[in-house]
Image (tube, coloured by chain):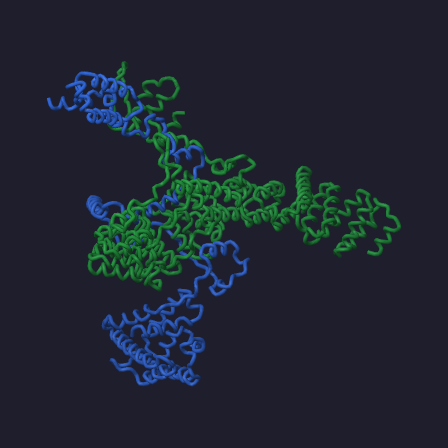
């Protein structure tokens, strides 16, 4: 218990105290006391003349107990994510259900916030002691409403750009003078947000699903407002300080008004003004948007770096990541790979540790398309093996997807894929998987590769570890899985896959279900398995009868599926089921697209003959004839040849006509 | 030279077919263009500027040259073929060969709108390139103007790319997975098929670095760093704040168990902190010692020392000292209220009690 209470590795003496073991011998005491590393300790001597060293009290903050407890709980692959935990029937397993579940919970929270903001008069009494600020309505109203300087400052602080612009315009009309510092702050605000309101901060789940909801922008494009508010305010400043110019440069660079940004930057350089690190970072990031040829783009980046050196500004991780980003935008540049390596060496020289973003950009440069071949990914994995990674920049989250994609598409190497997966699962790296779309792509690539190249057992091991709670597969993965089952005779897993289809809500996907049933019907399996198959067939038929009666869409929807069901039933010698299926089919022909296969019909006829039921056999054959199946002749022959059935003369006549 | 030329060449480059939109071939084109300019024959120049292929049908497909008469076209072609024989790099200082001049005129004639500018531009360029090639042939360092003009010319050209293609992410990822099975979309057809790229064996962290930055000694650099940081960081700028907030958005992970949820709530201030401290949140209160609550006699120093008022106030103090629900300022306020009340009623009290009724009497003494 004590071990879990202390989040950090326990000092020898403290552990001794709390362990309910017998007292240590003096020898142990001395060993233990030599382990603790604090410098100032109170040393006392006990009656045996030995030193007892009392270590200093550790400062624990308010979260350490909880953190210690949380560290004892690991992710259980067989249980759903914490946010989905609920009544077992209500736990979502299909991807659509997961998304709706998470988003609907969050929309409830959002609604609560909305009420708190808009009906704040009902929430002003807060009896909690000490008061909880989060439950109090937020103070959205402005204290200053006339166009004064204080009003402008208030709006700048609250980052309400549009309101600030209004106040500014009104004040200018009313000839109110603003102090320089206010104008500067205003300019900074305008440059950061390009003279429009900052985007509404999304709630966590919304943010996680933002790409599925269509919130993410695709291509970077120039959005800077030329001759907009920012430039106006800049022009109206009497003294354009270095900070102001840099703010404007940064704003223009960020919103891709590269011509003006670089023009201003060149001016500043000519006047030998000191330029800040942030400005350099922004400019390096957009250098590739400024010029047209690879050479000039790289030259621009290089000259910026040299200017940094001249100005004595120390680069940091962001600088180099932006350099790598610029390189990743020109992956076909013939010098790009060598320049990339040189940049990494430079980072090493300066003692800056490359982050996941750097590795991601390196991958983009070395694998610009799906046919590139390189050993960079291996080297990167060697370097990163076993490391605990943290998110230092938003683009770090794209590393794992890119790595897995390149491993699967360019290298087709399963071992490497497992290595990447192991890296993802060390420590807390799983947090770096990014949002839902990136996660989907990662697992999709991973599982497809595994299905293509691994043995059945290994495949199912990985498959069962990952689904359904860690991730829900999509159609392409299940396709590959069924292919693997077919190739590797993994028929014993088909019932599991069927239940998974139900879980993931794919049972109404006709192609997938057809493929599954065709595999089930392929050959006669041993008894238990076959009986499971026939049970599934029975279930499908039951469902059909239920749902078709209620006019609801049902999984059993095509003729070939019916054929497979018949075959499965016959294989498990459940002739009644087979006949039931056939009967249902004949009665509801318009519910099915396509006819059952020949072999299925023939096996049905064979089944009928075994039972000695000539009526049914006749019915089947006449159906086959009506649909003009190719196997009708053979079926007729089968009936005529069989010695288990006595045919009446009318039946013989009918058969002769066919 | 200037803008006229620029726009003209913009037009020219845009109909150099789909192939030039792929940047490597544009790169090549420019390199070849530079090389060919140095040979300074009109045919080569026009070919380079018009997009490499000498037999391109570019004359037909643009508005700029759509009015080119057949004769002009033929003569243009004829001139280009005839001037092949004039592949004489040496043109003399400043002077340009007569045949080249005539060829330039013919080109200018075939361009309907901008004839005169075309001619003068071509001739100017021919002259400068002639000079440049002469310098370089002689091995003398050429003046920056000539060589830089060439690169300026070409760097000023705008390369028109086609309209942005498919969405980047999905297109790349999706195409990767299907390989050749999926039929290429319309835009993909225009692209050349992905080439086989072999990047040589990579060794991380070995070999040359950019060598732009130098590591200064640790002592110096830390001083300089400290200085620059104090000078430039007069508080975290809005840029950094915004980035930090964005990063926090990305870093946010939904809790994976109840403990993590409790951690989140504790951070938001919604949950008691462990180990439980009954006085959590009561910071002001923790700063006041108990003596301020209990020993309140000095608050009634200016009340009379005897009499019913004093008696009354002492009882009030006893009550207050036993009251655990009020804060110290609230208790002082309570006493203050009484003070004000008695001051208001001073006249009546003085009548009734004499000196024992006055509050200010202690001060006056």
**Quarter of the rendering occupied by the C terminus of chain B:** top left
Outermost residue, left side: B365
Where residue B27 sits, quadrant-wise, is: bottom left
Q: Residue B108: in sight, yes or no?
A: yes
- Quarter residue B263 falls in: top left
What x and y, as percent, mark residue A540? 66, 43
Tell me, by letter, which chain the rendering colours green: A
Query: Seen from this angle, which residue lies furthest top?
Result: A47
Is residue A43 at least partly visible in the picture?
A: no
Quadrant of residue B45 within the rendered picture: bottom left
Q: Position of residue B86 (x, y in %)?
A: 34, 83
Instruction: From the viewer's side, name the closer residue of B160 and A157.
Output: A157
Tally of numbered discs? 0
User: Up-down: is A58 above or below A309?
Assistant: above
Q: Point out residue B98 in the picture as x, y percentages from the top left corner.
A: 31, 85
Instruction: Give left or right: position of A340 versus A87.
Output: left
Residue at the image position 75 percent from the left and 41 percent from the top: A576
Q: Colour of chain B?
A: blue
At which x and y percent is residue A44? Answer: 25, 19
Q: Quadrant of the N terminus of chain B?
A: bottom left
- What residue is at 47 percent from the left and 64 percent from the top? B192
Q: Farthest residue in the right direction?
A: A649
* Residue in the foreground of this view, choosing between A263 and A606: A263
Report the residue at 19% width, 16% height from top.
Answer: B307
Q: Is residue B62 above or below residue B252?
A: below
Q: Nearer the viewer, residue A384 or A620?
A: A620
């Amino acid at each position: 218990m004590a071990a879990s209470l202390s989040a950090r590795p326990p000092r020898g003496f403290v552990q001794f105290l709390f362990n309910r073991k017998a007292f240590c011998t003096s020898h142990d005491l001395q060993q233990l006391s030599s382990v603790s590393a604090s410098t100032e300790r109170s040393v006392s001597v006990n009656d045996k003349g030995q030193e007892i060293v009392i270590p200093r009290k550790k400062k624990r903050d308010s979260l350490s107990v909880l953190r210690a407890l949380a560290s004892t709980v690991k992710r259980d692959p067989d249980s759903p994510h914490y946010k989905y935990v609920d009544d077992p029937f209500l736990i979502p397993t299909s991807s659509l259900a997961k998304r709706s579940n998470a988003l609907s919970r969050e929309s409830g929270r959002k609604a609560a916030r909305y009420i708190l903001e808009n009906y704040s008069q009902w929430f002003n009494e807060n009896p909690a002691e000490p008061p909880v600020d989060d439950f109090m309505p937020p103070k959205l109203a402005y204290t200053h409403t006339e166009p004064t300087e204080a009003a402008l400052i208030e709006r700048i602080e609250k980052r309400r750009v549009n309101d600030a612009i209004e106040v500014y315009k009104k004040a200018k009309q009313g000839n109110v003078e603003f102090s320089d510092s206010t104008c500067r702050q205003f300019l900074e605000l305008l440059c950061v947000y390009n003279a429009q309101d900052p985007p509404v901060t999304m709630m966590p789940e919304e943010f996680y699903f933002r790409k599925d909801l269509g919130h993410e922008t695709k291509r970077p494009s120039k959005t800077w407002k030329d001759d907009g508010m920012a430039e106006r305010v800049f022009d109206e400043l009497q003294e354009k300080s270095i900070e102001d110019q840099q703010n404007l440069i940064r704003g223009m660079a960020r919103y891709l008004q590269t011509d003006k940004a670089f023009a201003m930057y060149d001016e500043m350089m000519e006047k030998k003004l000191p330029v800040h690190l942030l400005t350099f970072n922004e400019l390096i990031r957009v250098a590739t948007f400024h010029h047209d040829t690879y050479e000039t783009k790289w030259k621009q980046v290089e000259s910026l770096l040299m200017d940094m050196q001249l100005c004595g500004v120390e680069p940091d991780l962001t600088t180099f990541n932006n350099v790598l980003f610029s390189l990743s935008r020109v992956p076909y540049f013939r010098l790009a790979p060598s320049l990339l390596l040189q940049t990494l060496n430079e980072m090493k020289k300066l003692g800056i540790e490359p982050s996941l973003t750097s590795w991601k950009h390196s991958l983009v440069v070395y694998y610009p398309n799906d046919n590139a071949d390189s050993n960079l990914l291996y080297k990167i994995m060697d370097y990163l093996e076993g490391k605990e990674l943290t998110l230092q920049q938003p683009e770090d989250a794209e590393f794992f997807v890119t790595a897995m994609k390149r491993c699967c598409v360019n290298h087709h190497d399963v071992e490497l894929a497992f290595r990447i997966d192991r890296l993802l699962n060390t420590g807390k790296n799983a947090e770096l998987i990014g949002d839902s779309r990136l996660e989907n792509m990662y697992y999709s690539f991973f599982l497809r590769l595994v299905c293509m190249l691994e043995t059945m057992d290994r495949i199912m091991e990985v498959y069962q570890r990952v689904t359904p709670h860690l991730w829900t597969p999509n159609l392409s993965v299940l396709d590959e899985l069924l292919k693997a089952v077919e190739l590797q005779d993994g028929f014993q897993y088909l019932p599991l896959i069927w239940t998974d289809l139900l879980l993931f809500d794919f049972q109404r996907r006709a192609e997938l279900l057809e493929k599954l049933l065709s595999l089930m019907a392929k050959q006669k399996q041993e008894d238990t398995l076959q009986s499971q198959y026939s049970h599934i067939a029975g279930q499908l038929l039951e469902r059909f009868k239920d749902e078709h009666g209620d006019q609801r869409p049902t999984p059993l929807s095509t003729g070939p599926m019916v054929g497979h069901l018949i075959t499965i039933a016959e294989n498990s010698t459940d002739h009644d089921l087979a006949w039931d299926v056939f009967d249902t089919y004949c009665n509801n022909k318009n519910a099915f697209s396509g006819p059952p296969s020949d072999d299925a019909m023939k096996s049905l006829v064979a089944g009928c003959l075994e039972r000695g039921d000539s009526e049914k056999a006749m019915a089947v054959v006449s159906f086959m004839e009506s649909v003009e199946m190719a196997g009708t002749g053979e079926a007729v022959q089968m009936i005529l040849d069989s010695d288990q059935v006595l045919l009446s003369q009318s039946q013989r006549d009918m058969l002769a006509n066919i | 030279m200037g803008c006229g030329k620029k726009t003209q060449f913009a037009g020219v480059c845009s109909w150099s077919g789909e192939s030039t939109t792929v940047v490597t071939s544009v790169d090549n084109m420019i390199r070849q263009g530079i090389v060919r300019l140095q040979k300074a024959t009109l045919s080569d120049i026009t070919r380079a500027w018009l997009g490499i292929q000498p037999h391109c049908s570019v004359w037909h497909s643009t508005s700029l040259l759509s009015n080119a008469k057949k004769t002009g076209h033929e003569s243009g072609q004829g001139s280009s073929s005839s001037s092949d024989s004039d592949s004489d790099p040496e043109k003399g200082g400043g002077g340009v060969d007569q045949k080249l001049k005539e060829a330039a005129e013919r080109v200018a004639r075939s361009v309907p709108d901008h004839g005169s500018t075309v001619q003068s531009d071509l001739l100017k360029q021919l002259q400068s390139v002639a000079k440049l090639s002469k310098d370089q042939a002689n091995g003398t360092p050429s003046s920056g103007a000539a060589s830089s003009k060439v690169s300026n010319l070409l760097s000023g050209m705008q390369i028109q790319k086609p309209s942005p293609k498919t969405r980047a992410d999905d297109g790349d990822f999706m195409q990767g997975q299907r390989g050749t099975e999926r039929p290429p979309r319309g835009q993909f057809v225009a692209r050349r098929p992905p080439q086989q790229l072999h990047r040589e064996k990579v060794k991380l962290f070995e070999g040359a670095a950019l060598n732009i930055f130098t590591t200064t000694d640790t002592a110096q650099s830390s001083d300089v760093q400290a200085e620059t940081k104090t000078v430039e960081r007069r508080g975290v700028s809005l840029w950094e704040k915004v980035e930090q907030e964005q990063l926090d958005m990305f870093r946010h992970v939904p809790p994976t168990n109840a403990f993590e949820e409790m951690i989140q709530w504790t951070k938001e201030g919604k949950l008691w902190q462990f180990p439980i401290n009954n006085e959590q949140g009561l910071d002001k209160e923790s700063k006041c010692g108990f003596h301020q609550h209990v020993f309140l006699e000095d608050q009634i120093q200016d009340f009379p020392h005897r009499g019913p008022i004093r008696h009354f106030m002492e009882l009030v103090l006893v009550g207050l000292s036993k009251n655990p629900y009020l804060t110290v300022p609230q208790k002082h306020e309570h006493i203050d209220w009484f003070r004000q009340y008695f001051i208001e009623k001073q006249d009546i009290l003085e009548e009734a009690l004499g000196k024992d009724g006055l509050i200010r009497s202690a001060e006056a003494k």
